[in-house]
Amino acid sequence: MYRIGELAKLNQINADTLRYYEKNGLLKPSGRSASGYRVYNDADAQQLRFILRAKAIGFSLTEIQELLEIDHNRAQWACQDVKGMVEAKAVLIQTKIDELVQFRDSLQHLADACCGGPESAEHCSILDALEANS
Amino acid sequence: MYRIGELAKLNQINADTLRYYEKNGLLKPSGRSASGYRVYNDADAQQLRFILRAKAIGFSLTEIQELLEIDHNRAQWACQDVKGMVEAKAVLIQTKIDELVQFRDSLQHLADACCGGPESAEHCSILDALEANS
DNA sequence: ATAAACCTTTGAGTTAAGTCCAAGGTCAAC
DNA sequence: GTTGACCTTGGACTTAACTCAAAGGTTTAT
Ligand SMILES: [Zn+2]
Ligand SMILES: [Zn+2]
Ligand SMILES: [Zn+2]
Ligand SMILES: [Zn+2]
């Protein structure tokens, strides 16, 4: 049995984050104390670790909500569904990677063409490229 | 001489975006008509293209503001400064790429271990991995 | 008995880069 | 002389995931 600050500290997150997760349906404490304090049990703590692990892998909170629903009703879902989610996410990430690689390469091109010297930038090829009218 | 809607259409952006750029010090129209309409001249239009080009390469509006300041005062800056900005940005992008590649690989690992079959997810290795206590 | 450290709720603020709305003024065409 | 397309301003809203503040109640230790 943990109070909010305790559970937060154990997982190195902010107590406010736990309240936020509760408000957004990700983790509801199993009970409340007589005075109204949130009380989390071990199952709650395990679910929090599930959430944090999924987040670390890169899932959004919305996606984690879906994963939790599947996890809580495993019998009603197929491996297909779960694998599908993960693979769709992988494709999205790959797209993002491709974009960033393109971006990095354009920057590298610009930088390579610039002398990088200490004299005035009046002839700078980077600025010229940005100013170019084509 | 362009009015706001005209310049926006020519550059395939929203007129609101031009007002936003003005509010944020990126592009001030060189004049106003008698009735208060914004009036952009060719230099304004060229600066807008500078902004859009830099944005397409991946610079943030804040960074573009810095680039504009350098561009407007080229004599007071060195190629070093400009090249430094671009290279710093490239390093940042590379870091992001590395993170995403890691993320993609974790997802791939998870997906590879899952059978992906149509039967119940009660044995799903992906969910098990997220639930794992280690 | 009182101070420190905890907890409660509600509600607002943060970042980035816009987008949308309402209420009204202006300009060209028919 | 009236549509319709355009322009003005100010301010609210959007996404994601928190984070903080205010004003007050509870627990624990001294
Ligand atoms: Zn140079
Ligand atoms: Zn240069
Ligand atoms: Zn399976
Ligand atoms: Zn599976």
Image: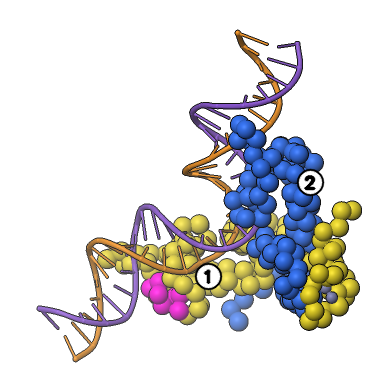
Chain colours: A blue, B yellow, C orange, D purple
Above-or-below relation of A107 to A44: below
Viewer-proximal residue among B58 and B53:
B58
Residue at image coords 75%, 64%: A71
- CA distance for labels 1 and 2: 57 Å
Residue A75 visible in the snapshot:
yes
Instruction: Indicate yes or no whether the magenta region holds residue B124.
Output: no
- The answer to whether C2 appears left or right of B29 in the picture is right
Mark in the foreground, 1 or 2: 2
Residue at image coords 61%, 31%: A35
Amino acid bearing label 1? Leu
The residue range painted magenta reads B3-9
Q: Position of residue A86 (x, y in %)?
A: 77, 72
Q: Position of residue B89 (x, y in %)?
A: 74, 61
Above-or-below relation of D27 to A31: above
- Quadrant location of residue B7? bottom left
Q: Main secondary structure of the magenta part?
A: helix
Mark 2 Cα-neighbour bin, 10 Å: few <14, some 14–19, many ≥20: few
Q: Quadrant of ligand 4?
A: bottom right
Residue at image coords 71%, 37%: A3
What chain does badge 1 belong to?
B
Q: Which residue is mark 1?
A: B48
Secondary structure, mark 1, is: helix
Quadrant containing the C terminus of chain A is bottom right
Q: Which residue is mark 2?
A: A42
Above-or-below relation of B69 to A35: below
